[in-house]
Image: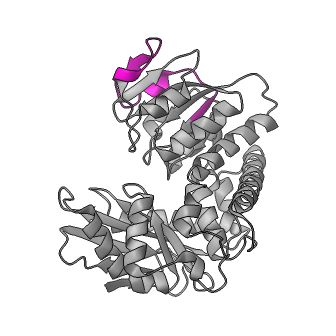
Amino acid sequence: MSQMLLHSDAQHASSPLFSTTLSLPGCDAEGWVVVDSMVDGLAMGGTRMTATVDEAELAGLARAMTHKLALVDLPIGGAKAGIRPNGPVRDRAALMRTFGQVTRPLLHGGVYLGCDQGTTHPDRDVFFAAADYDIASRPGATRLSVDWAEFWRTMSDITGFGVATAALSTLSAAGAKAPQRVVLQGFGTVGRGAAQHMVAAGHRLVAVADVHGTIEDPAGLPVDKLIECTSSDGTIDRRQLPASVRVHDGDRAWLKVDADVLVLAAGADAVDESAASSVRAGIVVEGGNMSCSRAARGMLRLAGHTVLPDVVVNVGAAAVTGSIIAGVVPSGLTVPQVSAWLREWISAKITKNCELIQELSAAGSPDPVAELLAGRNIAL
C-alpha cells in the first residue's frame, strides 16, 4: 500500500484524511481505500467493485459515509474502498483473498471495509477470512451469540427497511391514508427490500426500473413474483412477468409513470437537472448513494417536492455495522433480540432526521443536510 494524501482534520477538510493505493499482486485490477475521517480511531465503509470506480468517486462516497454515521450519532468516521478490474474477473475468490491480505493492516487498524456495489456478503466473508478479521472480536464491540456472517443474514434487508421507513414516516406525517402509488428505480438488494416493506404497509408498487427499462402495472406489481424472476444484480426476467405488466424501454421511462412516491435505489445522479422537472411524485426518496445531483435536489424542493436525502435514508447497513463495532447495541442478547433492537433504533433515527429535514425545508433552508451536519460540527 502507498499513502497518497494526508490531512490532520477531516471533519473540516475539503479532501480525505488519507487515500491509499492498493497493490493487488497477481490480480489484473487496481484498488484504493479512501478514509474521509476517523473518530476514536474508527472509520468504516463499503467496498465497491465496478469497471469505472476511481479515487475521486471513492472520496465522495467516503465523505457521504462520514455524514451518514454522524447523522445517526455513531462515533465512527467515513471510508470507502474500490476495486477496478482491468477486464473480466476470472478468479473472483483469488481477487477477494488478495484484497483481504492487502487491506489487513487497515482492517485491524480500525478501518472496517464491508461490501458495496459490485461486491457481495460472500465476497466480504472471503476477504475477512484472508485478513483474519472478525468484527465482533474488536475491543468494545458488541458481543454476538453467532458469527458475523450468520448474524448478517438476519439483517440483509436492513437498508431497504430504512429506505421504506423514511417514506412511510413521511407519508404518515403528511396524513396520507389511502394506498399510495410507488415507483422504484432500481431493483437490487435495497430496492427489493424497500418494495417488500412498502407493500407490506399497504401501498402499491406501480412501476420498477432496471437496466433494461421500466415495467409498469397501475393495479400494482406482484412484488414476490418480481423477486422470484430477478437476478442478484437486480435484472428482471421479462419472460416471467404476468400479462398485465407493461414493458417500457428507455433508461428514464420511470419518470413518465404517475406516482406519489419515487424511490431512487440505483446509481448516482438518477435525477439530475435535466430530469428534475419531469418528476411527478410528491415525495422523492434517495435510496441509493447520491441519487439526485445537488442542483436537482434544490430544483425539486423549489418545485414543492419533499426530498429525503441519501445520507438520511440510505443508512441501514452502515448503522447496523457501526453500532456493533462501536458497542452501541447491548451485548448478551439473542439474535432475534439484537435484530429487533437494531430495527427499532434505526427506525427512530431515520424518522427523526426525516422530520428535521422537512422542518428545515419548510423554514426555507437551502440545504437542510448542511444545517443538520453543522449542528454536529461537521462540514458538508
Query: How many callouts does the rendering have?
Result: 0
The reply to whether the magenta stretch includes residue 64 is no
Residue nearer the viewer, 323 or 156 = 156
Q: Residue at x 76, y 22 (%)?
A: 178
Q: Nearer the viewer, residue 207 or 132?
A: 132
Q: Quadrant of the C terminus?
A: bottom right
In the picture shown, does residue 225 fall above or below 365?
above
Identify the image's colour scheme: rainbow, by chain, secondary structure or one colour: one colour
Residue 147: which quarter of the image?
A: bottom right
Q: Measuring from the top left, give residue 156's x and y in whole percent.
A: 55, 53
Is residue 259 found inside the magenta-colored segment of the image? yes
Residue occupying the point 58% across, 45% down = 298
Can residue 69 be seen here? The reply is yes
Q: Given the current orientation, which residue lies at the most extreme top position? A: 243
> Residue at image x 48%, y 29%?
226
Residue range in magenta is 239-262
**As drawn, is 189 to the left or to the right of 91?**
right
Q: Is residue 315 visible?
A: no
Q: Residue at x 71, y 71 (%)?
A: 376
Seen in the image, is 150 located left or right of residue 140? left
* Image position of 331 with respect to 151: above or below: below
In percent of width and height, residue 300 lies at 59, 38
Q: Quadrant of the N terminus?
A: bottom left
**Along the line of sight, which residue is nearer the eye, 163 or 129?**
129
User: Whole-percent x and y of residue 152?
Assistant: 56, 60
